[in-house]
Image: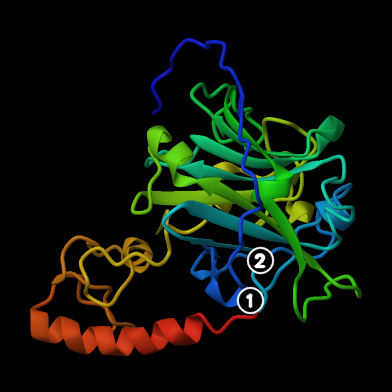
Amino acid sequence: MKRIIPLVLVLIATATDASAQAFPGDALWSPLYCGQAVMNDRFQDEAGAQGERDIVGDFDAPAAMYTSDAMFLYMRMRLDADALPTPGQLQPFSWGFAINLDTDLRNYEILLLVDGNAGANTVNVLRNTMTVTPNDPTDPAEMSVMSFPITTHANRRTAPGSQFGGSNDFWLELAVPWSTLMPLGLDRTTPIRVWAASSTATNALNGDFACHDGATGEPVLDVIVSDPTTGDPNVDTDGDGFTDAEEVAAGSDPNDPDSVPTSRLEGGGGCETGRGAGFVIALALLALRRSRRRVRS
């Protein structure tokens, strides 16, 4: 349960980067997962959240992905329409990722939001320290941490081969510096879980949620949360051939080279193995990992 602290006035610092970030190419992104399948969302499943507010995706075309480098965490979501049709001018809504840093999946600690409400046109980092309604994804984040202009920290591009509504779908991407996230408890090896959604709010998610069918009722945080992963999908702390994200998802220890994900070919048996057995399992799962990553970007 998170520690409740007094709400204080936080000055919103606006970044003044001179040039836009070079967002990674399509091949460098990794999908987020829900229920051991890539994060997906049905076309027009949420009433009132259509077009650029409609997150779309299936098992071959993930609804949300992420990647990282030494400087930035990058996140993207697939939308049925372009959220940024005019350079520097978002449609008047918001899109974001809520991030959980602890074992309580009924709340989140960080909200990353691309905000076009009232012409804001910013990428905002917010902190959620006081849970008003547990397990409610619309629970607002009350503390603004940092704000960046979309001209440097957001990006849109056509999603290749993706036409869920009969016309081209689009990626909306954001970039947030690790230097902003690390003081909040999130670094490249931090275990996390993620929610992705569109919104009409400036400090919460309340629209179309990935991994939730809007026809089934209201979303609940601990039901629609992503599978476990880490801040950077590419880091391999113990050098055993499996990324920290893969190990966290499988329940093995990313800091122990003798602890590797259990081979599905062997049908279980635990994570701890001898080094020789671990190497054999690693070879099998490396092949499995490559096949899982052959999803359309």
User: Reading the chain from its start, which is encountered first: label 2 or label 1?
Assistant: 2
Q: Which is nearer the eye, 150 or 207?
A: 150
Q: Which amino acid does label 2 sit on?
A: Asn
| Residue at image point 50% right, 45% down | 177
Task: Tell me: residue 220, above or below residue 127.
Answer: below
Mark 2, Cα crowd under 10 Å, few <14 / some 14-19 / many 20+, is many
Find numbered disc 2 in the image and state the secondary structure of the residue it sits on. loop
> Dots 2 and 1: beta carbons under 8 Å?
yes
Residue 165, how many percent across, how many down? 88, 70
Residue 155 located left or right of residue 222:
right
| Residue at image point 19% right, 60% down | 255
Residue 163, how many percent across, how many down? 83, 75
Task: Tell me: residue 224, above or below residue 144.
Answer: below
The residues tagged by marks 2 and 1 sit, at their Cα atoms, a distance apart of 7 Å
Q: Which is nearer the eye, 100 or 19?
A: 19
Q: Which amino acid does label 1 sit on?
A: Phe
Residue beneath label 2, please? 40
Residue beneath label 1, please? 59
